[in-house]
Amino acid sequence: MAAVTLLIYHCFIFSWYVFLTYLLFTVTSKEPPVGVFLYGGQWKYLTVLNVVLQTIFYAVCFVSDLLMPVKGIRLAKCIIFCRDLFFSVLAFPASTFVFLSFWALYSYDRELVYPEGLDLIIPPWLNHAVHTAVFPLAVLEILNSPHRYPEKKNGLTFLGICSVTYLSWIMWIYFVDGKWVYPFLGLLSPLGFVVFLLGSQALAALIYITGDTLNYVIWGGEEERKKNI
């Protein structure tokens, strides 16, 4: 994609995520819907965290596009490095994980992950904007521009740390408030809970490897050329 076109695209997507972030943090109702509690606020939901992550990522993309013509400058190189690391370890895995896990659970029993009462305060289009559209936008980012992935060992380690941090946050909320952010967690046996944790980590790792592979298949030649410059 041409540099100017890419700049405009990233500016548009950044604005879109700013809009979504604003809507998610200004949703109000007189009483919390059944299955929803106040402790932890919006920050306990991976969906909301992902939208915030995407907003930050596309802001970094927009800045890196502006600095691309002067990428010999150390600041530009640093921002481009942060952009690629952010995308590979957080932006792509988080969007894909949210999309796959949400709709899998929703299709089985929506009350386990998205109580029906939320329909009263979150319109269907917003639900799809934060749970569906995030995935094709993440894939489109790979198609639009190359991203230099870190060494697989380092990338998976960083991703694992982020995953464990979020899962620890979910467990902390349960220990403090006595409620699970996602109701289905309360239905799991101790063994089932361990299997869920391991399965989530495995899925996140698989998503990371898929993104890395897709990025290489599309941009591998160009990335090698850049490394030799």
Image (cartoon, grey):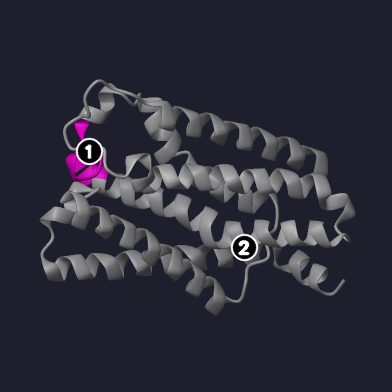
Query: Residue at the spot x=36%, y=69% of the render?
Result: 202
Q: Which residue is mark 1?
A: 37
Name the amino acid type tagged 2.
Leu
The C terminus - image quarter: bottom right
Q: Nearer the viewer, mark 1 or mark 2?
A: 1
Q: Are marks 1 and 2 in contact (CB under 8 Å)?
A: no
**Can I make out residue 206 in this image?**
no
Against 145, residue 109 (above or below) is above
Q: Which residue is mark 2?
A: 85
The secondary structure that dominates the magenta segment is helix
Q: Position of residue 164 (x, y in %)?
A: 37, 66
The N terminus - image quarter: top right
Query: Residue at the spot x=61%, y=76% of the render?
Result: 151
| Magenta residues (range) | 106-116
Residue 113 colored in magenta in the image: yes
Against 162, residue 224 (above or below) is below
**Can I make out residue 76 in this image?**
yes
Q: Secondary structure at mark 1?
A: loop
In this rendering, position of residue 222 left or right of residue 210: right
